[in-house]
Amino acid sequence: MPADCSAPPPEFNFAGHLLAINAERAAKTAYIDDRGSLTYGELDEKVRRAASALLGLGIRSEDRVLLLMNDCTDWPVTFLGALYAGIVPVAVNTLLTPADYAYMLEHSRARAALVSRALLPKLSAALGACRHGVRHIVVSRDGSDAEVGGTLDFDDWLAGHEPLAAPAPTLSDEPAFWLYSSGSTGKPKGTVHTHGNPYWTAELYAKPVLGMREDDIVFSAAKLFFAYGLGNALTFPLSVGASVVLMAERPTPEACFERLTRLRPTIFCGAPTGYAGMLASAALPPRPQVALRLCSSAGEALPQDIGERFTSHFGCEIIDGIGSTEMLHIFISNRSGDVRYGTTGKPVGGYEVELRGEDGKPVAAGEIGDLYIRGPSSALMYWNNREKSRETFLGAWTRSGDKYSCDADGYYTYAGRSDDMLKVSGQYVSPFEVEATLVQHPAVLEAAVIGVADAEGLTKTKAYVVLKPGQQASDALAADLKAFVKSRLAPHKYPRQIEFVGDLPKTATGKIQRFRLREQEAASQGVHA
């Protein structure tokens, strides 16, 4: 643990902590959303009113409440209000189906649901399709004036309660909130985090690695319900007294550019897919129109070409790192002034990492191994899922499910998910390595690589390629792409097949779902995946 980083006390309420350290910033803007702004003083009052209002519904300490809201100021008010009252918010992805929400409602046994007006139809469908204990629905209008019968209006609900005087006497190690893993297969896993966990991510990453400070304006394309977005747009800026831009709509390049040029944030947090889309957009603003001093990236490894082109255009670095829902935020990262594009950087202070082979022993430098992490922000468990908890949380260590290599200088390079690795001609091939090479070609916007069986039943690589606007698919271009990869990687790594597609299947966090491509390939061959 870094010498200058002290642990939170045993009795610790994270929401109470944030309000206390910002008490002298009452007049400063904390949040700007599509409807207006909220000062730190207003945030303090609303958080404590939300805490009182939740308790007024008969919800008690350790009860769960579902938080299904688009990014707006009501989101941090609700989240922190629940923590302040000792109630556990279950923050869920806004892009899912009613069936997903039905599962989460039953799994979490949420006593209440707080929902954006625009998302209420999905929630209503979910409630009608499951057994649940939801007794109250509180609706954030989120720009709409429409009232809905049988629900509580968020603003009126808050106004009807006095601010709670003091935070619940929660412990640093007790459950504070849940996040559901985005998962590529199977049911999402309810990942349980403590009051102490977000504190550690701010102290170990936001302050020493990002160098986030009070005068920053932070804008995250990743939404608040993601672990990455929660850190970017709540934990980190509120831990240093910065200001935050929230955006309810989908983070298209054009929507991001509008905020970057109008509100001029100094820190932008995105994902590789988003950065690629921004660079390919005809609306890309010139450098003088933005005020960026630093960007961060996570979700998938950032290709070297994208990082270099972004820095060349805007004059600021993208700090690429890897985190996870289980570890809450980034634990291996590049650093300002020490960015080595194409790598994920080095372990963040306070975290230990190991690369282990199939025998469970550490691998040699340069070899690919499974990534394990030890650090203070690890989740407690997956709720009601002992089997998966045992597979992931191994004593002090957490298994990431990612494969990495580490070079002689200590820089870590992503090699794909454990279940995405391919063995071609008896040798490991990282899909990401091939994808990162393909996107360096001037015609390619995105690429995804999977393994397919040839006539002899041997695994070979197949690439699905999304072209940049104005580019035309052709056999000649496919041949050119194969030659392009051959010229840069070992011969066994080049894609034997290339299929041009309009888009790639992704999770809500922007991660490519290679398993979907494998399923499509199996279906086209008339076999089971």
Image (tube, rainbow, N blue to C red):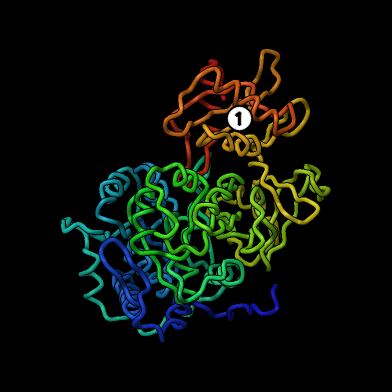
Q: Position of residue 146 (x, y in %)?
A: 16, 56
Foreground pick, 329 / 195 = 329
Q: How many marks?
A: 1
Foreground pick, 53 / 272 = 272
Q: Residues within 10 Å of mark 1 (few under 14, many from 20)?
A: many
Q: Based on the displayed image, in which of its 4 quarters is residue 438 positioned?
A: top right
Foreground pick, 413 / 101 = 413
In the displayed structure image, the side of residue 312 where residue 45 appears, left or right: left
Q: Position of residue 234 (x, y in %)?
A: 44, 67
> Where 130 falls versus 115 (above or below)?
above
Q: Based on the displayed image, in which of its 4 quarters is residue 89 positioned?
A: bottom left
In the displayed structure image, the side of residue 450 where residue 44 appears, left or right: left
Is residue 392 among the parts visible in the rendering? yes
> Where 524 falls versus 148 (above or below)?
above
In the displayed structure image, the side of residue 425 where residue 262 appears, left or right: left
* Quadrant that contains the C terminus: top right
* Quadrant that contains the N terminus: bottom right
The residue that mark 1 highlights is: 450
Foreground pick, 495 / 425 = 495
Q: Based on the displayed image, in which of its 4 quarters is residue 490 positioned?
A: top right
Q: Position of residue 528 (x, y in %)?
A: 56, 21
Residue sitting at x 71%, y 14% = 456
Dot 1 lies on which element? strand
**The furthest residue to the top:** 455
Amino acid type at circle 1 is Ile
Residue sitting at x 41%, y 75% = 84
Q: Position of residue 71 (x, y in %)?
A: 35, 58
Is residue 52 among the parts visible in the rendering? no
